[in-house]
Image (spheres, helix red, strand yellow):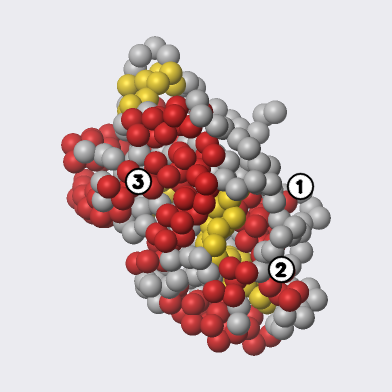
Amino acid sequence: MQTYGHLPVSFERGEGVWLWDDAGKPYLDALAGVAVCGLGHAHAQVTAALCEQASTLIHTSNLYHIPMQEQLAERLTHKAGMERVFFANSGAEANEAAIKLARLYGQGRGVKSPAIVVMEGSFHGRTLATLSATGSRKVQAGFEPLVQGFTRVPYNDLDAIVKVAANSNDVVAVLVEPVLGEGGVVIPDEAYLPGLRQLCDQQGWLLMLDEIQTGMCRTGEWFAWQHRQARPDVMTVAKALGNGFPIGACMAQGEAANVLQKGTHGSTYGGNPLASHVALAVIGVLEAQGLAQRARTLGHQILEGLTVGLSGKDYVQEIRGQGLMIGIELQQPCVELMAEALKEGLLINVTAGNVIRLLPPLILTDQEADEIVSRTIKVVEKVYG
Ligand SMILES: *Cc1c(COP(=O)(O)O)cnc(C)c1O
């Protein structure tokens, strides 16, 4: 079905930060499959885990113990400061689990019609519940009736949520991205996440962070909440967890960790031996190579390069980033830049209409990071200079 408009290219193979099209032309991949291939393409350890597990045991069922899944659960929750995890196959499914968890939590406290506070400009997925939670009319239009039980407020606005708290008895949770991804790489004030944490504590609400794009070292910490020590009750991850192999996870700690009980949720594939082994390999590499710290360093380097290179350009509104999640906001819509960049052998994304989004793999060399900067500037100047 024609759900995507495709750029005029197809890739044949990849290695690290590079992709080659069917004519043999190399491209510098500053998007990484939208924050998925954090370790780049064809990473040897990921490939080895995949091949080894595929030739041993791909799938059994969650009706049985899956030692590989148990190992992954242990490693992942430890990194994330969480206690328990439910494995799914995508980000949207991880968020579905979080939404169900919040409702069950609310029902358990006698709230007949539990509501979740969600944000304008957010993105949580394309299933019915997650598109209803998403703060974008474009994602929702035509799919009414939407799933009920979401109360929307502006992003990065604590006062708006305090008002909701004063006026509603039905709220049981807040679902929020630590940095808006699809919404345009919007980084909230330093006090925002700690403020949400405090409010949730006061109200007995669950703080649920969607770290599907920000997680797995992307922003310069394993998880973005660690920049502010605002530990959530529930956290979802996906994307970079499998480096391209589909896997998602909904984690929880404290009271939230014991809400979903036997029979309340499930998934045929979720956390099967193959997905679990791949994710374990990904965590191993991120850890062994200190890629959280590396993302921070590279992020500074790229941000500085862009800021210097694009200084004084009146078509640039703002350049911002956290680790290797970087946005260049332009004064005008700039979707055409993706096709222009292709010609220069550069893969970038434009989101929210006028924000160039860079989400390169974390395994970049310093030289490759500089090359992303120079090619990006070249494309922008070519079109608007
Ligand atoms: C990509 C994304 C999702 C959806 O993930 P899928 O795997 O496409 O279902 C949800 N939330 C955020 C923040 C994302 O970036």
- How far separated are the C-alphas under marks 3 and 1? 43 Å
Disc number for residue 103? 2
Relative to 18, residue 121 above or below: below
Foreground: disc 3 or disc 1: 3
Which residue is at the front of the view, 153 or 270? Answer: 270
Foreground: disc 3 or disc 2: 3
Q: Residues within 10 Å of mark 2 (few under 14, many from 20)?
A: many
* Residue 306 point in image, percent of width and height: 25, 47
Q: Secondary structure at mark 1?
A: loop
Q: From this viewpoint, is residue 199 visible?
A: yes
Relative to 189, residue 142 above or below: above
Q: Are marks 2 and 1 in contact (CB under 8 Å)?
A: no
Relative to 171, residue 330 above or below: above
Q: Residue under label 3, please give it.
A: 284
Quadrant that contains the N terminus: top right
Q: Are marks 3 and 1 in contact (CB under 8 Å)?
A: no
- How far separated are the C-alphas under marks 2 and 1? 25 Å
In-image side of 382 versus 356 (left or right): left
- How far separated are the C-alphas under marks 3 and 2? 34 Å
* Residue 195 point in image, percent of width and height: 46, 79
| Picture residue at 55% right of the left edge, 65% below the top | 252
| Picture residue at 51% right of the left edge, 29% below the top | 56
Q: Residue under label 1, please give it.
A: 142
Q: Could you tell which of marks 2 and 1 lies nearer the N-terminus? A: 2
Q: Secondary structure at mark 2?
A: helix
| Picture residue at 81% right of the left edge, 55% below the top | 145
In-image side of 128 versus 54 (left or right): right
Which residue is at the front of the view, 341 or 18? Answer: 18
The picture quadrant where one finds residue 42 is top left
Kind of residue at disc 1: Gly
* Residue 50 point in image, percent of width and height: 45, 31
